[in-house]
Every structure is written in structure tokens, then in C-alpha cells.
Image: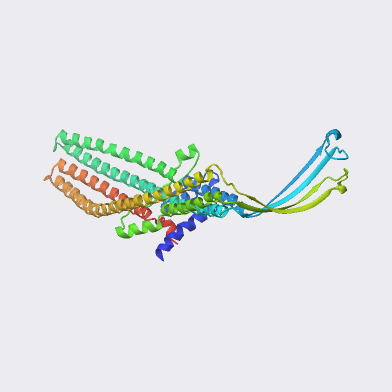
Amino acid sequence: MKSLRLLLVPAAAAAALLSSPVRAAAASPVVPETLDLPTALRFALDHNFAIRQARERIRQQEGVVIEVSAREIPQVAASAAYQRNDPEISSGFPAANQSWQINLTASQVLYAGGGVRSAVKATKLSREAALLELQAVINAALLEVRTSFYSVLLAREQIKVQESNLELLQQQLKTATDRFDAGTVSSFEKLRAEVAVANAKVPLITARNNYRLAIEALRLAVGFVSSPLEAARAEPAFVGTLDFAAQQFDRVAALQAARANRPDLQRLAKLAEARQEGITSAQAGFYPNLAAFGGWNLRKGATNAFGDSNSGWLIGVQSQWDIFDGRATQGRVMQARSALTQTQLALTEAQLAIDVEVSRAHSQWQQATELAEASARVVEQATEAVRLANARYNAGTGTQLDVLAAQVELTTARTNQIQAYYSYNVAVASLRKAMGQGDEILVKP
């Protein structure tokens, strides 16, 4: 029941998106004061350009279904003509200088070798494939948004780490300067502290630039379109942290879930069914077609008076059979069979690619889990090492080099920790997408 729920929720989300075509084309939105991950994901559902294009492809396919289905129902047409001419060229007797007629006809295909029915089935299957494509696009787009949001949080935390590192090094520089002024240390220690402070500014500058770039990548992922001035001056406060909440995934179960739930696999399966119907539609050219028709006709009578017009009805059947068409039908059947084979090969290839994708995602999740667990212990140890190094230095039993080395190790440990937490959250989201599960925001009630 749980797997069925995971399948139905993205479909419901896709249907909801399909029913709101105009909302995404509204005026440019205002940059919010704060932005959290759920808000970014919901915004992307309406504004992400890949999702909007996939939604339009469904509407396009619906138009194809309507067009092809029209061959199953009666066709009604009306025509009228009026002509005025020189009596000398009149073919009637007595000669007339004008003529008119009105025709009303209706026709219905009775038999077309199964071509009409199979063509309608093929277009409906193609529409179902387009809906599954929308689900796949939603999963991919929301993964990109989630990853981009995590990148913003990562860049923000890296700024904090580098700022903290710079602050500690500046405190160390102040201590070295005070000791130099007191004559207890050489100028070399002061110079070394100054160099450490200068070097610490470089990664801070880089972290701030990475933060700006991450925001732009997120803006592109969610489809946030605004004026250049608004985009340049407005920046929301991002709400959220990179946490580590361990989850369990079984590799075999993940592979089975991907085979059952991936919408791109289901899309190719639907297209294969449509290609099979395409063969039937092409083979219809080998058979005769039969149509019934009927109508009513009004035309000019012996005089020009409209009341003297002749009218009557007609009914009949019409059949056509291309006994030999230069092997054109055979060529169409060959094309249809080749299209089916190509789709089946694409389905098999996609299954292999998805198996590899799931295996890689599961391996990345395992690595990220181990790194996240290890990084927490390292930060605790590095923090204690800095405390001890400062205590020894202040007591005169340690060196400045010990303090600087401990601070470098702490900065490295903190950087590795937030990178590990980022990698873990991305790995979980990537594995869920590889398994064919919709984003958590679609699954949550």
C-alpha cells in the first residue's frame, strides 16, 4: 500500500499542475524576506521552466488525441454555391443566367481495417506517456531545487566557519602583538600571526562568492524571474540547517523500487504499447475501408425563383481498397515495427541505466553516511585540541605553531563536517529520486 501511495501522489501532483496553466505566467514575483526549502519546492512546482514545458507537452498530446478521435465519430459538412453567368454559356434549357445549390452531408467510417481504433489507442497511450514524463520532470526538477537549496546552506555555513577561523586567528594575532610589545616573544611570531590572518581572508572571500553563486543557481532552479534591479538588490534570509538524520536503505529493495516506480521506465513502456498499436494502424492499409454517407441537396429549379428550387436527400455507402500501392503500406509497416523495436531497446537500456544509477546513488549514500558519522567525532577532538593548545601557549609550555596548527585542523574538521552533512542530504535525495520516489514535499500529506 505504501508503494502504491508513492506512485499516486506524484500523479496527483502532476494533475494538479496541469489544471493551473495561467498561474505560472503571472507578473514577476517579489523576493520574500525569508525562504525555506518547502517554500522553494512549492514555488518550483508552479514556476520551474522544465515542469511548465512538460505540462504544455501534455496539452499538445491532448490535442492530438482529439484530432485522431474525430475519425471515430460522424463527420457533418455543409456547402453552398451561387453563380451568375451569361445566358449564352448556360448549359441548361431554357438558358439561365444564374444558379445555386446547398448541400448538407454526413459520413461515418464503418470499417478501416482497425486503423482508426488503433490510432486512437496509440494517441491515448502517448498522452499517458506524456503524463509520466511530467512526473519524471517533476522529480528531477525538485531534486535540482533541493540540491541547490542545500548548496546555499552549505555556502552559508562555510562563511561562518571561515569567519570563526578568522576571528580566532585575529585573537591569536592580538596575543602575539601584546607579547611582542612586552618583549616576551620575537617579531617572527607576530609576523607569522599576521600571515595567518591574511591567509584566512582568502577562503572567506571565496566562501562569500560561492554563496552568491549558489543563490543564483537556486533562482534558476526554481524559475524565479525578476527584473535585473530586483535580482541584484534583493536577497532573502534562508531558513534551514544542514543536519544529519540517519536513514536506512537496502540496495536490493532500492533496485526493485526503481524498476516498479520510475516514471521514465513507465513512460517507455507506454510508448512501446503505442508503437504496437502503430503497427496495427499501418497494417490497416492492406484492407479495404467502408464508409456510410447521407445528405440533403437543394439546387436551382427551372426558374430563378427560390421557391421553384429542387431538393432531395441521398444515402449510400462507399468503399475503397488499394489493391496495389507500390508497397507503400509495406514500407509503413516496416517503419512501425522498427519504431517498436527501437522503443523496446530504449526501455531495456533505460532499465540498465537506472540499475546503475541506483547502485551509484546507494554507494554515495553509504559513503556520505560514514563521512557524516566520522566528521562529528573529529570536530569534537579538534575543538578540544585548540583549547589545549591555547592553554599550553598561555601557560608558556606550548608554541605559537601548536596553536596555529590546531586552529587549522579545527577549521578543516568543521569544513569537512558541513561538507559531509551536505553530501549526505544530497545523497538521500538523489537515492530517493533514483528509486522513483517523489520528493518528500509531494509525499507528505
Image location (x, y in percent) of residue 227:
50, 39
Q: From the image, which quarter does the C terminus lie in?
A: bottom left
On screen, residue 123 above or below 216:
below
The residue that appears at 29% across and 48% down in the rendered structure is 419
Closer to the camera, 289 or 263? 289
The residue located at (83%, 34%) in the rendering is 89
Query: Relative to the observer, which residue lies in front, 352 or 187?
Result: 352
Judged left or right of residue 224, residue 188 is left
Residue at the far left in the pictured view: 397
Q: Is residue 104 left or right of residue 337?
A: right
Front residue of 189 and 371: 371
Where residue 84 sits in the image (x, y, percent)? 82, 37
Residue 430 as seen in the image, left or right of residue 376? right
Locate residue 17, reporting x and y percent: 51, 53
Q: Can residue 40 be seen by looking at this rendering?
A: no
In the picture, measured across the screen, residue 204 lies left or right of residue 337, that is: left
**Color encoding of the figure:** rainbow
Considering the image in quadrants, where does the N terminus appear? bottom left
Using the image as rendered, state which of residue 185 and residue 42 is in the foreground. Answer: 42
**Residue closest to the far front:** 323
Is there any visible trace of residue 295 in the rendered image? yes
